[in-house]
Amino acid sequence: MSEPTHLIGTRNTLTIEQSQRIPDVDDKIFLLEPGESPLTAFLTQIGKIGDGGGKFKGMALQKRVVYNPEFTEYEDQYSGVWARINNGGGYLVGATDIVVDSPGASIFSKYDLIKNTRTGEIMRVTNVNYSTNTLTVTRGAGATAAAAINDDDWLLVIGPAFEEGSKSGDSNTTKLVKVTNYTQIFKTKFGVTQTENASKLYPSGTPGADLKYLRAKHGIEQAKKIERAYWFGEKKEVTGPDGKPLRLTGGILESIISAGNVQDESSSSLTEAEFRSFLQNYAFKYGSSEKYFFCGNTVLGYLEGFATSKMYVVPTDKTYGVEIRKFQSSFGTLNIVRHPMFDNQYAGMGVVLDLSTLKHCPLNGRDTTLETNIQDNDADEEVDQYKTEVGLQRVNFEKNALLKGVA
């Protein structure tokens, strides 16, 4: 036997046999064809700086490494300021105990000023019974005289009014809500025989070219699998058929539907007035004044019909390789992205996302990796696979909205 190669000094990643190195693909697969999985392209790249050559450096703002396959975050929101009268017969001018709902008495505190928006009367809260949703009030506390109150009248909380020299009021805070999701294991396997790998094949005529092609193609397939789970998945943890944990990561549609922020067109066309109502009542009711709108060809076709003058294309070098059209409205700005996965039964769907509510969450050390040479020891072939364990963080989904049923 010939003498093996000796490595003098400390071994490093350049002096060892290079085929030993398992390529860490990380989020780079989402840039191979970003238009195929635009959401994950954004989540893994936003915050990075482009070098002008299609590569990005820095830290992704919407990416978070997690250390447990069930990962947790906590969400909070500001207190509401609107409620309604809950009494079929309404209340007379002299009534001082009034019952409220939608959402109830929890948003009120002692000494709050509240306004009946129909009559203009301002009342001052002197006591709150949270168990019965009953407010005790001083009627006609402002310049407008007391007037009869109707069932379902809207009440607006203006804010407290304290007497000079008074003590502080009652504490009224909101409790954090625990939100969890699971990481899901994704695998994409492919391979070639050693005979095929050694052969010259069209179109390249270079031995080994087909395996390189499969690596690129299946990297995109892995990205698309993760993208579909992020949109259409449902959260669940069970014991699999082999007696080991099987976890599914919950997706975007599941959370938006749970939040109830949905406008259903009931298999009808989309008019400009209906789209404006969607923006006003759902898309921009909460959250940022600039959001992303992912839609299929059906919805995009209607938008191009009535909103062409309000849309313009954003340069692709600013949007991580994904073509975006901006739509300006009085309620906010939409970054419109045509999504290739919104087809067939989902062609009439559009989803507005505030990307601050989402994060791409790989399990520690389990981000996308290309594992090479995983075939059996005696197999005359080379088998590789992409492997990822990742989940989607979902918080404050009242900021997102779903438009569905457009035909």
Image: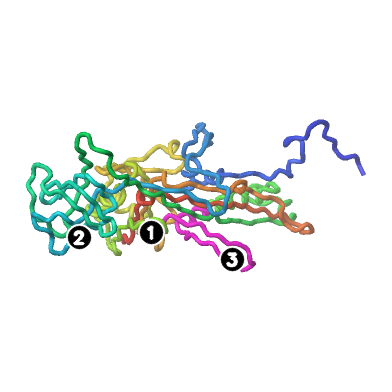
Per the rendered image, the range of residues in magenta is 224-252
Residue 86 shows which numbered tag?
Answer: 2
The local secondary structure at tag 3 comes to strand
On the image, numbered disc 1 is attached to which residue? Answer: 258
Query: In 3D space, how far apart are the residues under numbered discs 1 and 2 (Cα atoms)?
Result: 26 Å
The residue depicted at 45 percent of the width and 53 percent of the height is 179
x, y percent for residue 202 = 64, 51
Of the numbered discs 1 and 2, the one sitting upstream in the chain is 2
x, y percent for residue 383 = 69, 55
Magenta run includes residue 242: yes
On the image, numbered disc 3 is attached to which residue? Answer: 239
x, y percent for residue 221 = 55, 54
Answer with left or right where residue 94 lies relative to residue 211.
left
The residue depicted at 74 percent of the width and 35 percent of the height is 12
Magenta run includes residue 61: no
The residue depicted at 45 percent of the width and 36 percent of the height is 317
Above or below residue 88? Residue 118 is above
Quadrant for the N terminus in the image: top right
x, y percent for residue 265 = 28, 61
Q: Nearer the viewer, residue 55 or 58?
A: 58
Query: Label 1 crowding class (10 Å Cα cut-off): few <14, some 14-19, many 20+?
Result: few
Residue 87 visible in this rendered orientation of the protein: yes
Query: Label 2 crowding class (10 Å Cα cut-off): few <14, some 14-19, many 20+?
Result: many
Of the numbered discs 3 and 1, the one sitting upstream in the chain is 3
Three-letter code, disc 2: Asn
Residue 224 shows which numbered tag?
Answer: none
Q: Nearer the viewer, residue 192 or 79?
A: 79
The residue depicted at 9 percent of the width and 54 percent of the height is 94
Circles 3 and 2 in contact, beta carbons < 8 Å: no
Q: Nearer the viewer, mark 1 or mark 2?
A: 2
Three-letter code, disc 1: Ser
Quadrant for the C terminus in the image: bottom left
